Amino acid sequence: MPSTLSLAEAHALVAGILAANGCGERQARVVAEAVVAAERDGATSHGFFRLPGYVADLANGWVDGRAEPVVEDAVPGLVRVDAANGYAQVALADGRDRFVAKARTQGIAALAIRNSHHFAALWTDVEPLAEAGLVAFAFGNGRSRVVPFGGGRRLFGTNPMAFACPRRNGPPMVWDQASSMMAHGEVMLAAMHGKPIPEGAGFDAAGRPTTAADAVLAGGALGPFGGYKGSAIALMVELMGGALTGGDLGFEDRSGAFLGAQSSSAGEYLLAIDPARSGGGAFLDRTEALFQRLIRDGARLPGDRRYVNRARALAEGIRIEPEQLDALKRLRASSG
């Protein structure tokens, strides 16, 4: 029978695991928020499932769990943050207030994070900005896992991007997607459960198309979504998340020197726009008219399923299988 954890219990468990394995207490709390948010909202590929990877990266020294980001007020419209080889979520938390203040003052602002590790869902970074009334974008690159359209070898990361838009009544409209046909975490889950991946999503180590998730993970590669169109978007994210932040590009990945390294040392670029400065006072009414038209036509808004899962978790807690809960408790007790 599955066990149930309240959100507070889940956060305490995850933060305890991270702190026991090399994170500072503050850093552990921030990262745990992202992990629990993913599990709460049904994005299990970025939830509890990822914790062994977090522990591995802390244990082998690939990530500095006690890193203190260096926040620089660069120019009126830009905040730069050196994550100091720590987690991107901590860098964002430290730079967020200045970032939001600049967006409100200037109408638009950017936050550039470099020298960071992002191992979580990207929507958790932009949703709070939309809750504050801002339109927000995020771009994050990663180690090479994706073959560009027409190319012969891995070059891009899965290179996710996220977008969040505030609403007058109700939670923000938020979407988050990889530039690859499947996120790497989804492939990992498919391999763990022995399930195939869709045709066209991956290649084996010899470059042959495959539906075997374990073949993709064993030296294979992923393909971009939408052929050349997705490949062009992956290139844009590589430029935004890597080059524009001063972070590592996917092919500059250094994780091979750290046995079992899971995350990518890369960058994240965020943009925030104050719609009151751009679209005027009618922005929320106009966007709601569009959303309602979509809903009337039978479509659902991106992120709606996550909100349904969230409401259930808030009311009932997070369900977890006993075997997974026992494994997490062992990680908490492992101390590296």
Image: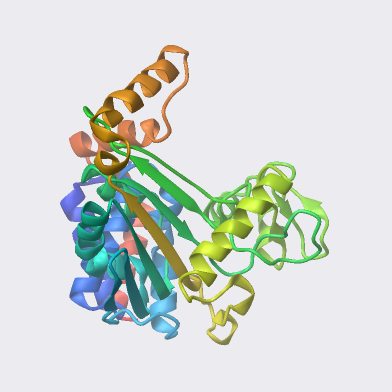
- Residue drawn 42% across and 74% down? 114
Query: How many callouts does the rendering have?
Result: 0
Colour scheme employed for the rendering of this structure: rainbow
Q: Position of residue 12 (x, y in %)?
A: 19, 61
**Which of 146/76 is in front?**
76
- Is 248 above or below relative to 125? below
Q: On the rendered image, what quadrant is the C terminus found in?
A: bottom left
Relative horizontal placement of residue 258, taking residue 235 as reference (left or right): left
- In this rendering, is residue 179 above or below 220? above
Q: Can residue 220 be seen at all in this image of the molecule?
A: yes
Res 238 → quadrant: bottom right
Residue 32: % across, % down: 27, 61
- The answer to whether 145 appears left or right of 267 in the picture is right
**Quadrant assignment, res 289:** top left
Residue 190 percent coordinates (x, y): 58, 49
Q: As drawn, is 163 to the left or to the right of 204?
A: left
The structure residue drawn at horizontal position 63% and vertical position 47%, both measured from the top left corner, is: 181
Residue in view at x 53 percent, y 84 percent: 258
Q: In front here: 226 or 135?
A: 135
- Work out whether residue 321 can be spotted: no
Rendering coords of residue 135 (x, y %): 33, 44
Residue drawn at 31 percent across, 57 percent down: 34
Identify the image quadrant of the N terminus.
top left
- Which residue is the extreme one toward the left? 8
